Image (cartoon, rainbow, N blue to C red):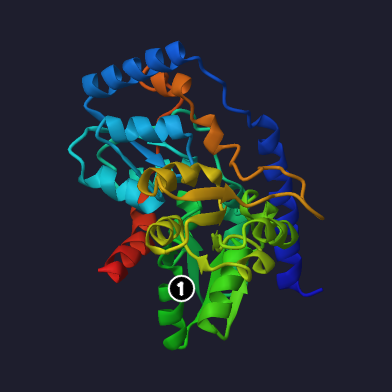
Amino acid sequence: MTANNLIAELASSSAAERVHEHLERAWSAPQYTPEQQQHYKERIREQLQRHNAVLVAHYYTDPLIQALAEETGGCVADSLEMARFGKEHKADTLVVAGVRFMGETAKILTPHKRVLMPTLEATCSLDLGCPADEFAAFCDQHPEHTVVVYANTSAAVKARADWVVTSSIALDVVDYLDRRGEKILWAPDKHLGHYIQKQTGAKDMVLWDGACIVHEEFKARGLEDLKALYPEAAVLVHPESPQPVVDLADVTGSTSQLIRAAQTLPNQEFIVATDQGILYKMQQLCPDKTFYVAPTAGSGASCRSCASCPWMAMNVLENLADVFERTDNEIQVAPELGRQAMIPLQRMLDFRK
């Protein structure tokens, strides 16, 4: 075993332990009565107005949270658009319903604003599986490679990178770098990395060994069985899914790209292989179409997620209603770290123009 492979294996092993530890602490969303829902929603609206705050929510959060963000003048979007919306909004405080790296990204883009989250325990297996110190050691083993990291990473990992990308722009950035003859180090999602390498034909691409616990649970056999039941359904797949699942897709893309596909494709039925929270927006925009969640059953599946991120589920009406009363839920990013992380983020923003 080479030194590089040993570092990758050790990092993968310790990362898996961290993910398992956090999964033990994740919990299921409570069920509210209509009266409880109304109580919490009214309280949240009042608090947002009183504190000149805006609620931004990710597509994977509970539909109740997404609807409330829209009703109160906030937004529902992917992680980058959430941060961009928060930067441009006049609110003094951003309330981020999502997972921790999303709050950090918002803080990096708007260091002068207060950024609160319903809970800082809401994390991400990709973030957990790519600790900054182990990642830095991995990068040091490949000093000739341009470091490209996915948005699903900590501020410290972003600060170590040359580029930060979202799934909607990753193909274009890697293709651009490859055409320039640059060697690429990609982190943290290996499935997305393999997909990008296959699509771009990047010749020299080193991959960190990480995965999303939601998308890794989708299985090709289960998807084939569901497709047999609904042969006219188009299959929409997020590229964080394993390659055999991606191979069955009619459209592979980011959350925003999958939503657009649902709107523009002529199909009336869709099988969706990503977090089922996205169905709220798809059904809202396409009320005359039918959507099915891709199965997470079959050989090798453990249903650790069942197409629903356990950490996204930690954003609930109750802790959202208490967001201004607690002292343990504000996102802090050290100024120098934020400035360093902003450099690769700004490269991405400039690239998109």
Quarter of the picture holding the N terminus: bottom right
Q: Which residue is mark 1?
A: 171
Confirm whether residue 122 shows in the render. Answer: no
Q: Quadrant of residue 169?
A: bottom left
* Direction from residue 240 to residue 151 in the image, left or right: left
Looking at the rendered structure, the kind of residue marked 1 is Leu
Q: Image point 33% across, 53% down: which residue?
A: 339
* Direction from residue 286 to residue 2 in the image, left or right: right
| SS at circle 1 | helix
Q: Image point 43% across, 29% down: which residue?
A: 64
Q: Image point 71% across, 33% down: which residue?
A: 24
* Direction from residue 55 to residue 312 in the image, left or right: right
Where is 33 relative to 250, above or below? above
Q: Position of residue 206 (x, y in %)?
A: 61, 74
Confirm whether residue 149 shows in the render. Answer: yes
Q: Image point 77% across, 75% down: which residue?
A: 2
Q: Position of residue 205 (x, y in %)?
A: 58, 78
Crowd band around label 1 with a 10 angstrom C-alpha radius: few (<14), some (14–19), many (20+): some
Q: In front here: 278 or 128?
A: 278
Where is 291 relative to 312, above or below? below
Q: Position of residue 248 (x, y in %)?
A: 63, 68
Q: Quadrant of residue 138?
A: bottom right
Where is 1 relative to 62, above or below? below
Where is 191 relative to 76, above or below? below
How many badges with numbers are in the image? 1
Q: Position of residue 168 (x, y in %)?
A: 42, 64
